[in-house]
Image (cartoon, rainbow, N blue to C red):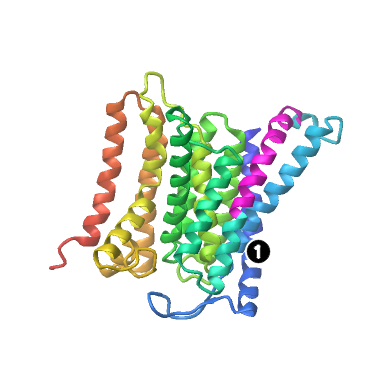
Amino acid sequence: MMVWAGVAAFVVGAMLAGLATPVTRTLAYRLGMIDVPGRHKGHKAPVPLLGGCAIFMAVALPSLLAAAVAAYWGAHPSGACPDWLLAYVPGAARKAPLAVGILAAAGLLHAVGLRDDRRALGPLVKLIAQFAAAAFVVFVCDVRVLTAIGPWGSDILTVVWLVTITNAFNFLDNMDGLSAGVAILCCAALLGAAAATGQAFVAVWICLLAGALAGFLPYNFHPASTYMGDAGSLVVGFLLGVLSCLTTYTPAAGHDWRTGVLVPIVLMSLPLYDMASVIILRIRDRRNPMVGDRRHFSHRLLQRGMSVRTAVLTIYLCTAATAIAATLLPQVVGLVGALLVLAQTVLIVLVLAILEFGDRRP
């Protein structure tokens, strides 16, 4: 049942995003929501924004519809619910408020992103919105990680993690198809963990997000005919952060509890590396670390002679490697094995660093 629900969610998300993206592209031209070349922009011709609207709609509309139906069937069990769905209705009805709350927080970031795409708000406003959305899902929706360390520690850690991942994917949206493609690979790894532990709610939602990204990606891959903008990248990063918190990483018998903690870190290592390296470079040069430029590791790969497609595919492959490592981590017995997987991830990141900063002499 869960397999078919996931397939259906992926197909629905892909179809909605695939159909909506051309519409948002046309609307962007009419509204003047265009990303014009200049400053640190790498594209040569104006590109319409609003692709993020297609992604958000493809996730939000099916989710809200499913939440409404589940809540109704949960309150009216004698309604028109098919017999084969009855066993899943109580659980879905309990999760409906959580889904609505998370989407409300994502909607806030979507609105802020749209405003920023229209006219730059500045990094401080966006950062405040990210902390507000993260705090909302923590304190209102009760989304938390590592509750064993105590309520305050868990609250702070969860908020910081959500804001960090949101920014990481916002930073990563710097080249055609990069953020969307990396997000799909992260969804695949999260799906493996959620499905392995029977988390139907999380697994289906991951499939829906992956489908929305897959429907959008053909329009965003180089040469992109539309961009997701901050209205999309903030939502994608936030939802991935939330889903990584909701996913339970159950390691094999005899595991060290720290093994599960490493899973999302390993999975998100490439976006985190990009964000950290860019911030360090900007601070080193006494520049605002939140103001965009062409210092991202994808740009640095271009400076090494790669084409846009080659650079993006290189990052895809490295992300796939870390995603596989993250998928295997819950099955590793003992902390030593987990640390070896972590070391493998570090080596992958170092390979990228060598490609970026290695000797330029022939």
Residue 94 counted in the magenta span: yes
Question: Left or right: where does residue 35 sit relative to residue 23?
Answer: left
Badge 1 marks a residue whose secondary structure is helix
Tell me residue 271's x, y (percent).
38, 53
Name the residue at 28% across, 47% down. 348
The amino acid pointed to by label 1 is Ala
Quarter of the image for the C terminus: give it.
Answer: bottom left
What residue is pinned by disc 1? 20
- Residue 135 against residue 110 in the figure, above or below: above
Residue at the top extreme, as displayed: 254
Residue 226 in sight from this viewpoint: no
Tell me residue 103's x, y (percent).
63, 50
In the image, the segment drawn in magenta is 86-106
Tell me residue 270's x, y (percent).
36, 51
Name the residue at 57% across, 29% down. 198
- Residue 355 against residue 68 in the figure, above or below: below
